[in-house]
Amino acid sequence: MNITLSQAENIIAIAQKKSKSIDTKMNIAVVDSGANLVAFVRMDGAWLGSLDISIKKAKTARYFDMNTGIIGSLSQPGGSLYNIEHSNGGLITFPGGVPIKNKNGVIIGAIGVSGSTVENDHAVAEAGAEAL
Amino acid sequence: MNITLSQAENIIAIAQKKSKSIDTKMNIAVVDSGANLVAFVRMDGAWLGSLDISIKKAKTARYFDMNTGIIGSLSQPGGSLYNIEHSNGGLITFPGGVPIKNKNGVIIGAIGVSGSTVENDHAVAEAGAEAL
Amino acid sequence: MNITLSQAENIIAIAQKKSKSIDTKMNIAVVDSGANLVAFVRMDGAWLGSLDISIKKAKTARYFDMNTGIIGSLSQPGGSLYNIEHSNGGLITFPGGVPIKNKNGVIIGAIGVSGSTVENDHAVAEAGAEAL
Amino acid sequence: MNITLSQAENIIAIAQKKSKSIDTKMNIAVVDSGANLVAFVRMDGAWLGSLDISIKKAKTARYFDMNTGIIGSLSQPGGSLYNIEHSNGGLITFPGGVPIKNKNGVIIGAIGVSGSTVENDHAVAEAGAEAL
């Protein structure tokens, strides 16, 4: 099972709407089940450095099939996954990456959002992931 | 002057329509005047390896403000720009990357397309670039 | 549709048998439909530099859903895909990478083989790809 | 002294058996005395991001001839090897990488395992390393 472009575009549209509703400017990336980019948008005025972060968040969420913030809670100094960020060409492990499931609960991709606080990033990613 | 997301999405929509009209499946990337990604789509079933190529074509077209194929004609063995592809983290210098100009002729970004023959890639990129 | 580890191991076993029958020592890699590694073996005494080449051949074959040698015939100086090897973190475009199809003809991964002449590399990859 | 493919495959088979016995899905990599990959398997459904981590764990264990977790205890903030993970193209220093010794105690390679908790990863790596 893999996400379609139509699904990815729908997810990004919902995520953009959420982003605007909380007055933020986001980079939004969607990857497929193989962690390869399917669709991406950078909203006007969004941070340039968040471009790469949004893509890495989406990849990270699919790489481990969990929200990126969970990994970040384990990768702190003294944590069991300390410095896991050095793998896979660079992970981003703070909130804003969320797996995307189809109606049967199968993970078919992931969304990554970056451009505001991690709380806002996560909220927008969550809104997108729930669009299906 | 810089491209907006709205313009980039319009360009991608036109490029997708052109791609479908010639029965191809494309990766389509649009970068801004800073050569940074603004929007991207991978059509269902498009080659996975064309993801990176489409982005590199868009960047290459903006890096040098010309169609990528022109650079490729100069980067051949014995040519004046031989192996320029080693720069900038990897250029793609065959056709499919085209600068995007606004109505006053100012370059505000570039489009890169990959997924078929270079002739088809260029035709789709050209259609997108002319959308504005 | 994606390749299973059991299928990949079977493919590698057949490829190894073919490699021994022609008195060669190979690196053999199998990637899935997302171009991510599923299984790999380096036969005793096989060239060390062929490790990376075998993986890149498998990825390249899946990236473009064709034998790697076909791409190489188009990426020569003056060819339409000249220097495509600079994309995707490095492609290998000489023979030895072959897509893997299931019984319905759907591509579910790819095999890459390196360690001898490109003719031998291709023969071993072909034997592996036909194992399913 | 260097590990053979036959030994590496035996080690991976034992590690897979251990992985199944504790109901986990692992990426398992074996490198030789030169820290170069000899054999690799990704069990069906194992985390995609653990592919790279398992290989980096195996390399890290051989780079320093010790269990990866030991290095991780020294690479914490304030520790003597703080941020050593930046070397060698990226190390992984939490548990799951274990040197492989022959019957005379000579290190001939290393195994890296990733796909579950670090305790489970280490248990599976240890089972594999003891197979010889």
Image (cartoon, coloured by chain):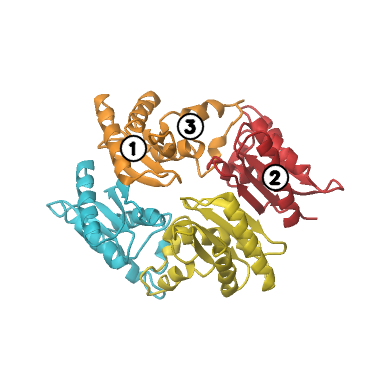
Chain colours: A yellow, B red, C orange, D cyan
| Along the line of sight, the residue nearer the viewer: B40 or A100 | A100
Q: Secondary structure at mark 1?
A: strand
Residue at 40% x, 43% y is C31
User: Is there any visible trace of residue B65 in the rendered image?
Assistant: no
Tell me the distance, in whole angstroms, between the alpha carbons under discs 2 and 1: 37 Å
Q: Position of residue D16 (x, y in %)?
A: 24, 53
Tell me the distance, in whole angstroms, between the alpha carbons under discs 3 and 2: 26 Å
| Kind of residue indicated by mark 1 | Ile
The answer to whether dots 2 and 1 both sit on one chain is no
| Kind of residue indicated by mark 2 | Ile
Q: Is residue D128 left or right of residue D115?
A: left
Mark 3 belongs to chain? C
Q: Secondary structure at mark 3?
A: loop
Where, by quadrant of the figure, is residue C107 drawn?
top left
Q: Is residue D19 left or right of residue B89?
A: left
Location of mark 2 (residue): B111
Mark 1 belongs to chain? C
View extreme (right): residue: B104
Q: Mark 1 or 3 closer to N-term?
A: 1
Location of mark 3 (residue): C66
Labelled disc at residue C28 = 1
| Kind of residue indicated by mark 3 | Met
Circle 1 Cα neighbour tier, 10 Å, few/some/many (<14 / 14–19 / ≥20): many
| Along the line of sight, the residue nearer the viewer: A46 or D104 | A46
Labelled disc at residue A132 = none
Mark 2 belongs to chain? B
The answer to whether dots 1 and 3 both sit on one chain is yes
